[in-house]
Image: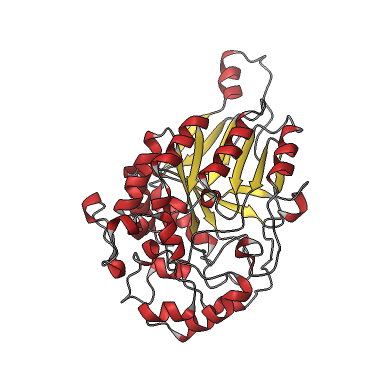
Amino acid sequence: MYPNDSLNNWHSGQGLWADVPAATWNDWKWQLKNRITSLEQLEEHLELSADERAGCLFAKDKLALAITPYFFNLIDHDDPNDPVRRQVVPRAGEMHTAPEELLDPVGEENTKPVDGIVHRYPDRVLFLVTDRCASYCRYCTRSRLVSNAQDYNFHPEFESGLEYIRTHPEIRDVLLSGGDPLLLSDRKLDYLLGELRKIPHVEFIRIGSRIPVFLPQRITPELCEIFKKHGPIWLSIHVNHPNECSHALRDTCERLSFAGVPIGNQSVLLKDVNDDAEVMKSLIHRLLMMRVRPYYLYQCDLITGSAHLRADARKGIEIMRALRGHTTGYAIPQFVIDAPGGGGKIPINPEYVKEVTDTEIIMQNFQGNEYRYPLIDAAQQAIDPEAPKLEPILT
């Protein structure tokens, strides 16, 4: 389906905004001011289905509609099932809540010691610093909070969050998220990163952002200087489909990399977007060419109104089997389910271990061939019959 991943074939240009001066187009604040945020604006450029029209009318009660001109330009307007379109144009399925769906599917509300801090894992915290994004993913895990369409009334408190981190020496890893932290001003980002760098026990600072994908114009030389100043700052971006891998995104990732920012990608497995091994292989290859390491492939969380976008988890396992051994290990993400209710990320892999006996592990490789590897205690017993036996790790 995507046989040629050459950078020369990647999407570029201004499309519907061809008459906008390049300097204006590349101004990230212009992109924000000119987002498509209403049904009327969408219908000027797209022939909407009844399903999409109903979704747009409902969006104000669930999760706001917003698409940057740059990202909207990546949509194939002649394809009603375009994979970029499916991610950002609301559909009627958002109006319906399946029995298994939750407003807080990964249990963040139960692990918030102070407003804006989620402390679920022993040595790291999630620091929610804003409720706004450049564009809104229709499967957003935090749709209860993001855009405030549901009147969650979230007001980030930087100081209370920073104080919590300062007074908990077990915290060595801080992930800034939201909303999208890179929508904050340079001044606020400089302050936040600077304050975190002053905390002796904070070793690792990460940012989760889809800004490079939705709004690459935001990654300015000035912002890169802030990352250099407080680095290393690690960045997780969010690309789901090869069609999002534009020249602009490639150039942005290069700019970030040259500023000393290691970049990983977190994709969400989505029905009719990337639930196909060839599509996923094309995506991960393009990511590597952009200096981005595929990091996680998430099973879509059980957020309300997402059933029409959730792919079967078995499809994720099938994709992982199709990748392992058929491309470089650097390209292969970890498929995970963020356990409903707050159990954390659980790796989901194809079964390569067939059996663990007292003497060996019996394995199957990517081609389905069987191999055996002796256990340590079996080798020791052969040399020294008096050597103590290890406890079995599996039954």
Q: Residue furthest left?
A: 8
181 lies above or below 328: below
Residue at image coords 28%, 57%: 22
Q: How many marks?
A: 0
Q: Is residue 80 left or right of residue 102?
A: left
Q: Is residue 314 left or right of residue 46?
A: right
**Quadrant of the image occupied by residue 304:** bottom right
Q: Quadrant of the C terminus?
A: top right
Q: Quadrant of the N terminus?
A: bottom left
**Is residue 358 visible to us here?**
no
| Closest to the observer, 18 or 84 | 18
Q: Is residue 262 left or right of residue 54?
A: left
**Quadrant of the image occupied by residue 276:** bottom left
121 lies above or below 151: above
Residue at image coords 25%, 57%: 3
**Is residue 125 visible to us here?**
yes
Query: Where is residue 133 shown, x and y percent of the image?
Result: 53, 58
Query: Where is residue 216 shown, x and y percent of the image?
Result: 39, 52
| Closest to the observer, 305 or 185 | 185
334 lies above or below 139: above
Query: Where is residue 203 shown, x and y percent of the image?
Result: 60, 29
The figure's colour scheme reads secondary structure
**Quadrant of the image occupied by residue 155:** bottom right
Query: Where is residue 173 shown, x and y percent of the image?
Result: 63, 35
| Closest to the observer, 389 or 15 | 15
